[in-house]
């Protein structure tokens, strides 16, 4: 017996990936509804070999639906996710709206699937931020070996993290640069073509951006509140695929080869770490892939018990859609749907 699944925000980049991932992983469905804003109602989207016509979120009735995968923006989720949850659907929300609510689990299945046992409190599960997901997937196996004390992370985040409009802006600015035509930034704060922007989301009083704060708060909630995290988040001219340079301090010694072997055995992680030209993964190569790739694992000689590594992952898949579908799969396994 399958489930009735509604995908909210179906015309967006993440919504498209959610539909594709549900089909690829053969999640047990009897019916799938593509749900979007009123201006997108009537548009057609693909689900496997089928074509779905988008329904209007404002009038969509969630009664009788088992699962609702949300990715419509935080303000829309704030209005409609509780409505879906009250109707009996288990909401898996990809926006930031519910991530920091104490009674809503924030889940990466490879890391803290047991937190799903509290999902029934509000019938809402939050999907973490894309940059946090890939980092904790890579670090959980090492934290299990030797406790992590401190993480310093610099991210190199694709324009796809800002949705289709972000990718379109990169494309248009790049194209027009070759023709010497101006294209003022609209999605990003400065030109993204041939540039890097150390500013994602709004600035906070301490000089951090909210994206950087998210990595701190979410690591505490998902992995371990005792871990200190310092992040610098940068938008780079890449369409899909986030990269992160991690510097990690442990409570005790951890040999780099032991770390490499532990990661090779970890769920959701692939190690590509050959110390030769091209013996590492890049964002372009990880696009369309499900794994979190770890490369350039090496000792940091400047601190006691330190390792550095390079981590890349498709931010639309594992950073969003895939993680949401994996949450649904785990809820199914735990008989929580």
Image (cartoon, grey):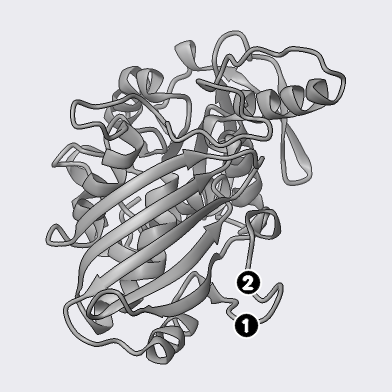
Q: How many neighbours does mark 2 have within 10 angstroms: few (below 14), some (14-19), or many (20 or more)? A: some
Looking at the rendered structure, which numbered label has been put on residue 274? 1
Front position in the image: 244 or 102 = 244
Residue beneath the point at 63% across and 71% down? 280
Q: Position of residue 231 (x, y in %)?
A: 32, 48
Q: How many neighbours does mark 1 have within 10 angstroms: few (below 14), some (14-19), or many (20 or more)? A: few
141 is higher (above) or lower (below) than 229: below
| Side of 325 where 50 appears, left or right | right
Residue beneath the point at 44% across and 46% down? 130
Front position in the image: 182 or 172 = 182
232 is higher (above) or lower (below) than 142: above
Looking at the rendered structure, which numbered label has been put on residue 280? 2
- Whether residues under marks 1 and 2 lie with C-beta atoms below 8 angstroms apart, the answer is yes
Residue 111: quarter of image: bottom left
Q: Position of residue 116 (x, y in %)?
A: 26, 55
Q: Position of residue 8 (x, y in %)?
A: 50, 28
For marks 1 and 2 on the same chain, the one whose residue lies earlier in the sequence: 1
């Amino acid at each position: 017996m399958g489930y009735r699944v509604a995908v909210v925000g179906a015309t967006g980049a993440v919504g498209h990936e959610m539909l594709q991932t549900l089909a690829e992983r053969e999640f047990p469905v009897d019916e799938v509804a593509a749900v979007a804003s009123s201006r997108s109602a009537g548009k057609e989207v693909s689900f496997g070999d089928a074509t779905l016509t988008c329904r209007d979120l404002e009038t969509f009735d969630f009664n009788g639906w088992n699962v609702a995968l949300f990715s419509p923006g935080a303000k829309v989720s704030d209005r409609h996710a509780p409505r879906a949850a009250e109707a009996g659907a288990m909401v898996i929300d990809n926006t930031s709206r519910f991530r920091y609510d104490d009674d809503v689990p924030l889940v990466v299945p490879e890391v803290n699937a047991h937190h799903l046992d509290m999902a029934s409190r509000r019938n809402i599960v939050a999907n973490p931020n894309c940059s946090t997901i890939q980092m904790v997937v890579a670090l959980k196996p090492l934290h299990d070996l030797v406790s992590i004390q401190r993480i310093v992370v610099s991210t190199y985040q694709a324009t796809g993290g800002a949705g289709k409009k972000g990718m379109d802006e990169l494309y248009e600015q790049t194209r027009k640069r070759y023709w010497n035509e101006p294209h003022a930034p609209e999605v990003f704060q400065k030109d993204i073509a041939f540039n890097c922007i150390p500013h994602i989301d709004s600035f906070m009083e301490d000089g951090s951006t909210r994206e950087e704060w998210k990595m701190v708060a979410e690591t505490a909630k998902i992995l371990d509140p005792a871990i200190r995290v310092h992040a610098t988040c940068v938008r780079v001219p890449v369409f899909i695929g986030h990269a992160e340079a991690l510097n990690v301090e442990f409570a005790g010694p951890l040999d780099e080869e032991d770390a490499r072997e532990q990661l090779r055995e970890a769920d959701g992680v692939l190690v590509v770490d050959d110390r030769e030209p091209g013996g590492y993964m890049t964002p372009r190569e990880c696009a369309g892939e499900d794994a979190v790739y770890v490369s350039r694992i090496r000792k940091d000689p400047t601190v006691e018990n330190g390792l550095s590594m390079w981590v890349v992952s498709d931010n639309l898949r594992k950073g969003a859609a895939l993680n949401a579908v994996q949450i649904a799969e785990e809820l199914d396994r735990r008989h929580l749907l």
